[in-house]
Every structure is written in C-alpha cells, then in structure tokens.
Image (tube, rainbow, N blue to C red):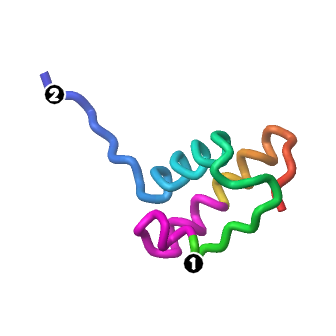
Amino acid sequence: MMRDHKPISIADQVFEKLERDILSGKYPQGEILSELRLSGELGVSRTPIREAGHLYTSEAANEGASVA
C-alpha cells in the first residue's frame, strides 16, 4: 500500500523548531531574534527564517497574541 507523503518545507520545519524553542524558554521574552542569527543557529538561509517569521506572526494574530 502506498502512502501519500507530503514533504514539509524548510520554512515549516524552521517554524516548528522556533515555536518549540520559544515555548521552552530558550529565548527570553522580548529578545530580538535576527534572521542572520537564526539562520546561523539553524543552518539554513535567511529566506526560510523570514517565511517562518511570517507564519508565526500570522498564527499569533489569529490567536490574538502580539508579536513585535
């Protein structure tokens, strides 16, 4: 039986990793997270970092949270 396998984009993977890190307290509240820093930490280019940031702010807006 073949299973449908939908690959997860790098931006989605970055989003999930950042969400876990933020919720775990890795980054203190109010800390500025630059694209350059995160791309170095995660070993990806800045584009997926930027895309994940857009996803995160969109999700936060849907939940009524504030993201600076």
Q: Is residue 45 magenta?
A: yes
In-front residue for pair 43/47 = 43
Q: Position of residue 17 (x, y in %)?
A: 52, 49
Which residue corresponds to the image point at 28% horizontal and 37% vertical from the top-left? 5
- Left or right placement of residue 13 versus residue 62 in this view: left
x 41%, y 54%: residue: 9
Q: Position of residue 37 (x, y in %)?
A: 57, 73
The numbered mark at residue 2 is 2
User: Magenta segment, principal secondary structure?
Assistant: helix
Give amino acid for label 1. Leu
How crowded is the residue under tag 2: few (<14 C-alpha within 10 Å), some, or many (20+)? few
Judged left or right of residue 28, residue 35 is left
Q: Which mark is residue 63?
A: none
41 inside magenta stretch: yes
* Label 1 packing within 10 angstroms: few (<14), some (14-19), many (20+): few
Quadrant hosting residue 3? top left
Q: Which residue is denoted by mark 1 in the rendering? A: 36
Query: Magenta residues, as a range?
Result: 38-53
